[in-house]
Image (spheres, grey):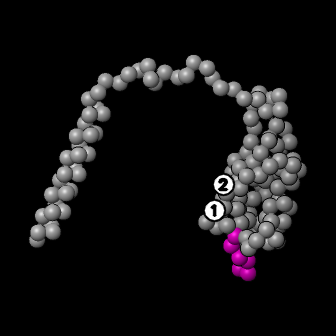
Amino acid sequence: MKNLSKRIYLIIIQVCFLVTNCYGSYTRPINASIADPYPTIFEETYNGINKLDFLVFGDWGYQGPDSRQSVVASAMKTWADNNNTTFILSLGDNFYTSNSTDHEGVDSIYDPKWKTSWLDVYGGKLNDVVWYTVAGNHD
């Protein structure tokens, strides 16, 4: 019983501390000058071109029946061929199981899925730009 009363006491103290600290932030006037944007906008050019063009995607799917991976890859190729795509961000979940004997993810840099699920699918200019890839829970 004594431990329970100590816990309740500590909880009450923590709640009071949080309430008093949060209350102060709502009652203080806001200084609008600190919210004004910096007067100079930072601009950067890439290879003399004034825009940065890159592709970002994730969950690229798998090769096989009902696969939409090749449709997405085709759209990406069209975009890259008609724009100045300088790199690609691949945000994970890249190598799914495509049949009952397949494994999820890749086993190593020598796994054949690198060819069948990536190199053979994302061709053209997509092979000429840098890919930055993040592994997901399926990889």
Quadrant of res 112: bottom right
Q: Is residue 98 visible?
A: no
Residue positioned 75% across, 48% down in the render: 88
Alpha carbons under labels 1 and 2: distance apart: 7 Å
Quadrant of res 10: bottom left
Identify the residue at the far right of this view.
Answer: 124
Amino acid at the residue labelled 1: Gly
Q: Residues within 10 Å of mark 1 (few under 14, many from 20)?
A: some
34 and 90: which one is in front? Answer: 34
Q: How many dots with numbers?
A: 2
Specify whether residue 96 is painted magenta: no
Q: Residue under circle 2?
A: 91
Is label 1 in a helix, a strand or a loop? loop
Badge 1 vs badge 2, beta-carbon distance below 8 Å: yes
Specify whether residue 103 is painted magenta: yes
Question: Split into 4 quadrants, where in the image is the N terminus?
Answer: bottom left
Q: Residue under circle 1?
A: 136
Sequence order check, earlier mark of 1 and 2: 2
Stretch of the chain drawn in magenta:
100-105
Question: Split into 4 quadrants, where in the image is the C terminus?
Answer: bottom right
